[in-house]
Amino acid sequence: MSVRTSIASIFEAALFKLGVQAQIDISRPEFAQHGDFSTNIAMSLAKQLKKPPRAIAEDIINNLDHKLFSNVEIAGAGFINVFLKPEVLKDLVFEAVNDSNYGRWNIGGGKSVQVEFVSANPTGPITVANARGGPLGDSVARLLEWIGYNVWREFYVNDRGAKIGHLARSLEQRYRQAMDLIWELPPEGYPGEYLLDIARDVFTEYGDGILKKDENERLAFFGEQAVARIIAGQQKVLKRFGVKFDLWFSEKEMSAKGEIEKALDRLKEKGVLYEQDGAIWMKSTDYGDDKDFVVIKSGGEPTYTATDFAYHIGKYDRGFDLSIDLLGADHQGHTGPMFAALEAIGIPKERLEFLLYQLVYLIKGGQQVKMSKSSGEFVTLDELLDEVPPDAARYFYLMRSSDTHLNFDIDLAKSQTMENPVYYVQYAHVRCNAIINDERANGVDIGKSLYFEDNLEINLAKELIDFPDEVKACALARAPHRIASYAERVASAFHSFYHDCRVLQEPFEILNRRMLLVLATRKVLSSCLSILGVTAPERM
């Protein structure tokens, strides 16, 4: 069970007796002397009930069921601090070991959620910048699965439009370079050396006959070859990174089916389109956006926004109850038009979420690694994974909130020291395994465990029983970085316990209860690492 949910229910029952309904916030006090858990509900209700918080707290305590508590006290201006009964704490840890669904919820009720992430243009390899969306989207999806949603992972392939034409012309020139012919990149071409590698592969496979085709045939060929080979490279490196998708959705295929025109027709039927300066606009300001946006350019070509609108309509036509888009922070201006367009055709805003993530800065040797995609000088995810193991790379991408810039310290990520947070967490899991698999553990019966007595035992137990509530909070906030922080707290509590509390050498009375903690720690850390997409090693 969730300990915070159980405590909140007890307080809600007490308030019900007082004729009051309120949302109960249960937190962990910073200091143990302030209780195992605490609530500020009395202070929250002071204005509503027109009574001093401490008086309200006394009324609540007088109507409280103490079945979980050894003591309840009022502190400060009106905080209510509760202390769990020793047997309750032990039983909760025992549940962590024996409940196969420990930490899982049914909040989603099996509803379908589509999570779209990475979606890098097929004009170049995955870089360390857009790679941040990989583990972030995958871990958000894993968290949603933990709370009962049916999750579909999707990569949107932007494989049509002007950029593909620029890519085709760029590859044609690189093809000429591979043949030692005169070549020059077009003004809007892609300068990365990766295209030369592709050109050499194409030349090896097809020879020099491509240049004999007419221009339209050549460009169609080079465009198809560039996109197909770049996508194959993206798929390969993301698989190496442990990031998989249920579908790589092709914009080109969507366009060929006429879906973009159908989507715009739906907007036209709602009367929200108008013509101005030869272009077609949508009245998105009628739906809360800060300005109207163009859906068809004066030349007749649908805009990026119109294309993306068609893609989003398709998501709901495919039956998804909720769609979550993970995008770089530079897409901030894209959210308003999308909400407006969907609302215009009757799709509630609540069915679409955007999770924007900030830039990544690589640090090596204490210095920032310079990256510039426009000049063709950037660090690819492949190059990063050649230096940093996938586990460490994923963890480092996830250990900071997505709405903050990430300083990725390559040297720290590569190190096998306790200063490296992923090593620190994984090593705690390894220590648990070493204890559990030791032959001296034979005869342990955690069912005979007594109450935890040592402060380090109690502190570790308190961290372990928080896992279900951490999962719920992190999933609802779409915040995998909080799972990383929680895993580090559990690892810290376990490392302290490991150093000062002997396990295998103790009499069975002590051994049983400490082995219970070890088993629960291994399970909780393994679950945390699984949510992050990081392995839980048995040995290191």
Image (cartoon, rainbow, N blue to C red):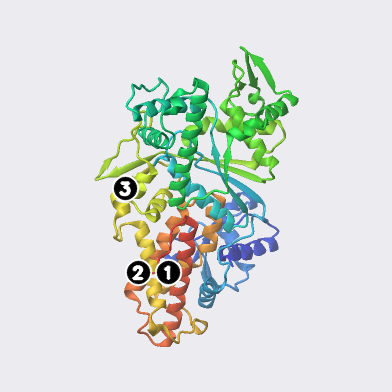
User: Which residue was labeled with disc 3?
Assistant: 409
When the figure is inspected, residue 299 is found, relative to residue 114, above or below; the finding is above
- Mark found first going from the N terminus, 1 or 3: 3
**Nearest to viewer (mark 3 / mark 2):** 3
- Mark found first going from the N terminus, 3 or 2: 3
Describe the element under mark 3 as helix, strand or loop: strand
Q: Amino acid at mark 2?
A: Ser
Cα–Cα span, label 3 and label 2:
26 Å
The residue carrying pointer 3 sits among few (fewer than 14), some (14 to 19) or many (20 or more) residues within 10 Å by Cα, namely some
The residue carrying pointer 1 sits among few (fewer than 14), some (14 to 19) or many (20 or more) residues within 10 Å by Cα, namely some
Q: What mark, if any, has residue 528 been given in the picture?
A: none
Residue beneath the point at 50% across and 52% down: 139
- In the rendered image, residue 536, in percent from the top left (x then y), is placed at 43, 64
Q: Is residue 502 left or right of residue 468?
A: left
User: Which residue was labeled with disc 1?
Assistant: 459
> What is the quadrant of residue 201 in the picture?
top left
> What is the quadrant of residue 267 in the picture?
top right
Q: Amino acid at mark 3?
A: Asp
**Nearest to viewer (mark 1 / mark 3):** 3
When the figure is inspected, residue 399 is found, relative to residue 496, above or below; the finding is above
Residue beneath the point at 29% across and 39% down: 369
Residues marked 3 and 2 touching at CB (< 8 Å):
no
User: Which residue was labeled with disc 2?
Assistant: 496
